[in-house]
C-alpha cells in the first residue's frame, strides 16, 4: 500500500447520497480534465465572485507514454458567484479549455515543465493589478517512483502572471529547484504555497514564505520544506530546509509524513501560523490535521487527539469515503471554508481519480467540520 496520489483508483459513484459536499468532478468527455481533477486554489475576485483554479488531465493526455501517475497535466479555472455552489468551468485558450499547460518545448524539450504542470498557489498582486501563480511541473526525464521508472517525477517550481486569471505569461526559468543528491528534497519540489510573512509577522526580515513538499526516498516519507524571500517580488527564494513536523508511528494516521497543505495566519493570533496539512499514511486513508507555528519552522499539533477532518468512512457510499487531500482554506463569514480533494473506497487498478469538495467549520473551531450540504 502506498500514498493515494500514486496508486489509488475509484469506481463510479454508488447510489444513495454520494455527492454531499462535492462541488466539481471530472469534465465532460473530450475536455482537458475529463479524467482527473485535483488541487483546488480558491480566491475571491474584486467584483465579489469566486475563482477556483485546479489542475487535472484528460484521458487522452493520460495515454502519454510512461507518464507519472498523478492528476497533474494542465490547469483550469471555474467560477462561482458565492464560492459555495454552481462552479462553472471557464473555457481557456489551451488544450480543450485549459488556461495553462506544459511549456511549448521551444528549448528542445529541456524546459523543466515540458511534460505536465499543476497549480500550487495563486496570489493577487495589488500594485500591478495581476494574479501571480506559483506552479510545479516536470519534464520527460525518467526517474524512480513507487511503481517503477516514470517520466515527470523530477518536478520543480515556476511562476506565471495574468491580468485576468485566464491568459498567463510564464516567468523564465526555474523559481525553486529540487535539491542536490543527498538533500531531503532531491527527488522533487512541488505544490508550492506562498504566505505573506509581513502580515503574520513570523520571521523578522522575511517578507514571504514558500511551503512545498517532496518525497524523501531515504526515509520513505513525505516532508514539507520552507523557502523564504526578503522582498515581495517572489523572484528570489532561499531554502530553509525541512520544517519540524515529525511523522507518526507505524500504523498511525501520518506514518508516511505530511504532503499538501494550506498555511494561513491564525485569525486569533496574527503572529502565529496555522497549517491544514494532508497526513499521508500506509492505510490509504489520508486525512487533514491542523498544526500551529510561531516561526514557520517548528510546528505543534493543534489537536493532539487526531485529525480534524477524515474520509466519510467505509461503507458510507460517499464520493470521499476513503481519503482526503489538497486542502485550500479561506476564512469568511466567521468560519473556515476548506476546499479539498476526496477519494472513494479504493480498488486495485492503480489510478488516482478524485473530485473536489467543500467543508465548513463550526464557527471558528477548526476541529469540527461539516461537508457543504450536510
Image: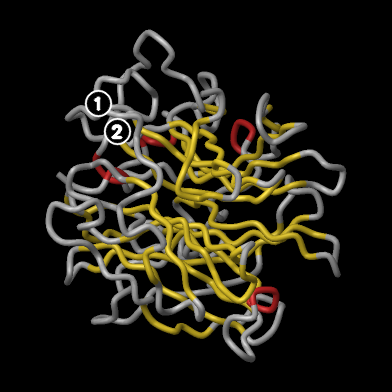
In the displayed structure, 101 sits above or below 127; it is: above
Q: Are marks 2 and 1 in contact (CB under 8 Å)?
A: yes
**Which image quarter holds the N terminus?**
top left
Q: Left of 126 or right of it: where is 299?
A: left
In the displayed structure, 280 sits above or below 87; it is: below
The residue located at (24%, 51%) in the rendering is 253
Give the quarter of the image for residue 325.
top left
* Residue that extends furthest to the top in the rendered view of this protein: 15
Pick whichever, 222 or 171, lies toward us.
222
The residue located at (53%, 63%) in the rendering is 263
The image position of residue 193, as x and y in percent, is 54, 63
Q: Mark 2, residues whose alpha carbon is within 10 Å: few (<14), some, or many (≥20)?
A: many
Q: Is label 1 in a helix, a strand or a loop?
A: loop
The image position of residue 110, as x and y in percent, is 46, 65
Q: Which residue is mark 1?
A: 314
The residue located at (70%, 42%) in the rendering is 51
Q: Which residue is mark 2?
A: 322
Of labels 2 and 1, earlier in sequence is 1
Amino acid at each position: 500500500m502506498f500514498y493515494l496520489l500514486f496508486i489509488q483508483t475509484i469506481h463510479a459513484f454508488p447510489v444513495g447520497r454520494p455527492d454531499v459536499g462535492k462541488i466539481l468532478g471530472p469534465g465532460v468527455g473530450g475536455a482537458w480534465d475529463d479524467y482527473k481533477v485535483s488541487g483546488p486554489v480558491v480566491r475571491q475576485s474584486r467584483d465579489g465572485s469566486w475563482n477556483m483554479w485546479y489542475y487535472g488531465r484528460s484521458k487522452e493526455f493520460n495515454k502519454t507514454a510512461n507518464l507519472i501517475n498523478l492528476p497533474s497535466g494542465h490547469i483550469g479555472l471555474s467560477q462561482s458567484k458565492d464560492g459555495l455552489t454552481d462552479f462553472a468551468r471557464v473555457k481557456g485558450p489551451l488544450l480543450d479549455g485549459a488556461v495553462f499547460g506544459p511549456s511549448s518545448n521551444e528549448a528542445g524539450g529541456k524546459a523543466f515543465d515540458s511534460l505536465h504542470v499543476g497549480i500550487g498557489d495563486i496570489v493577487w498582486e495589488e500594485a500591478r493589478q495581476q494574479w501571480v501563480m506559483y506552479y510545479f511541473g516536470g519534464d520527460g526525464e525518467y526517474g524512480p517512483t513507487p511503481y517503477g521508472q516514470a517520466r515527470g517525477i523530477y518536478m520543480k517550481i515556476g511562476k506565471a502572471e495574468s491580468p485576468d486569471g485566464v491568459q498567463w505569461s510564464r516567468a523564465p526559468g526555474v523559481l525553486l529547484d529540487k535539491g542536490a543528491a543527498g538533500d531531503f528534497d532531491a527527488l522533487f519540489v512541488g505544490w508550492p504555497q506562498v504566505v505573506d510573512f509581513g502580515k503574520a509577522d513570523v520571521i523578522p526580515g522575511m517578507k514571504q514564505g514558500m511551503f512545498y513538499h517532496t518525497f524523501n526516498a531515504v526515509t520513505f516519507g513525505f516532508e514539507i520544506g520552507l523557502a523564504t524571500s526578503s522582498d515581495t517580488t517572489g523572484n528570489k527564494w532561499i531554502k530553509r530546509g525541512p520544517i519540524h513536523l515529525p511523522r507518526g508511528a507505524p500504523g498511525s494516521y501520518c506514518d508516511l509524513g505530511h504532503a499538501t497543505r494550506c498555511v494561513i495566519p491564525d485569525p486569533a493570533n496574527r503572529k502565529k501560523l496555522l497549517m491544514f496539512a494532508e497526513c499521508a499514511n500506509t492505510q490509504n486513508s489520508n486525512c487533514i490535521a491542523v498544526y500551529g507555528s510561531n516561526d514557520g519552522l517548528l510546528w505543534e499539533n493543534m489537536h493532539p487527539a487526531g485529525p480534524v477532518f477524515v474520509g466519510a468512512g467505509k461503507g458510507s457510499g460517499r464520493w470521499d469515503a476513503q481519503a482526503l487531500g489538497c486542502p485550500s482554506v479561506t476564512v469568511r463569514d466567521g468560519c473556515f471554508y476548506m476546499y479539498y480533494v476526496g477519494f472513494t473506497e479504493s480498488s486495485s487498478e492503480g489510478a488516482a481519480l478524485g473530485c473536489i469538495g467543500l467543508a465548513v467549520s463550526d464557527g471558528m473551531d477548526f476541529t469540527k467540520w461539516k461537508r457543504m450540504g450536510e
